[in-house]
Image (cartoon, rainbow, N blue to C red):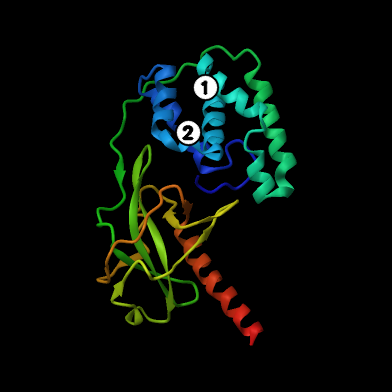
Amino acid sequence: MMGAWGTGLYSDDTSCDVRDEYVTHLSQGCASEEAEQKILDGYGQLLAQPEIACCVYFALADTAWKYGRLSASLKAKALPLLQSGGDVFVWQRDAPANVAARIKVLKALEARLNRVQPPELPVKFAPPKPQKVRTTAPIGSVFSLALPSGNAALLILVGYKELTESIDPVFSALSWRAASIEAVPQHITTTDPTLPFNAFRKQCAHVAILPGDQRRNILFRLEQTSIRVEPLLPYNPESIVWLAIGRIAREIDAFYDSHNHAASLAR
């Protein structure tokens, strides 16, 4: 599951994706149950993981209810999950201080799904647009990123994530920072460590660039290098956090600054 930033029903990437994709399917002419099934088919075996199942079924049931299209079968999936505590176990494990707030959100959803849903809300038809391909760089491409500290970092293209409106590159950040791009290694392998990125409740192995201006190339601050990656680095599409490019640069600097500080204290 992608990063979460709060206890709200739509305070994580997965729930937002489900909501938006469901509405998109309706706007493209899908019947309500067909739209539901498309979402569920897209997650497939991941629904066997309780944390992901809760995000998907809760967001899907809530959105369908608000649009007056909640099916009996979807309701029969979502309510038992809610009645058994939903994903509270995740919050007890990762963010105990927020458990009460999450319980309140889930109780409100359960009460809503048990009420008569509103009349079917009309959805304006919008034919599908071609997905925006952010870059055609091959997997394994290595990019340098200038950091606020004046140093440089390396981002390795490890895969692509297909979204509703775009196909986005996903990166791992090499555990490397130097004052000059000339000091970069010429060969990267799977044994070279990479940096984690913090999401709300966990660390993610990869980062994708959150676009600030859709008219601008999201790679505008990256410079492609000639560094080779052999073999390709591992890619886990369920361990991605989306951050603005400036935030990525600041987090890499912060990682090294904190580790350098800890090392100086240990001397």
Q: Secondary structure at mark 2?
A: helix
What residue do we see at 72% from left, 40% from top?
101
What residue do we see at 60% from left, 51% from top?
201
Residue 227 disc label: none
Q: Nearer the viewer, residue 186 or 144?
A: 186
Looking at the rendered structure, the kind of residue marked 1 is: Ala
Q: Position of residue 99 (x, y in %)?
A: 72, 43
Using residue 223 as the reference point, say whether residue 7 is left or right of it.
right
What residue do we see at 50% from left, 62% from top?
196
Looking at the rendered structure, the kind of residue marked 2 is: Val
Within 10 Å of disc 1 (Cα), the crowding (few <14, some 14-19, many 20+) is: many
Q: Position of residue 213 (x, y in %)?
A: 41, 50
What residue do we see at 65% from left, 17% from top?
114
Residue 18 disc label: 2
Q: Secondary structure at mark 1?
A: helix
Q: Position of residue 112 (x, y in %)?
A: 65, 21
Within 10 Å of disc 2 (Cα), the crowding (few <14, some 14-19, many 20+) is: many
Can I make out residue 228 in this image? yes
Q: Position of residue 20 (x, y in %)?
A: 46, 33
Can I make out residue 71 in this image? no
Q: Which residue is mark 1?
A: 64
Using residue 253 as the reference point, say whether residue 231 is left or right of it.
left
Using residue 110 as the reference point, say whether residue 167 is left or right of it.
left
Q: Nearer the viewer, residue 31 or 135?
A: 31
Q: Is residue 158 above or below residue 83?
A: below
Quarter of the figure with the C terminus? bottom right
Res 155 quadrant in image: bottom left
| Residues at marks 1 and 2 touching, judged by CB atoms closer than 8 Å | no
- Of label 1 and label 2, which has the lower sequence position? 2
Q: Is residue 164 above or below residue 259?
A: above
- CA–CA distance between discs 1 and 2? 11 Å
Res 61 quadrant in image: top right
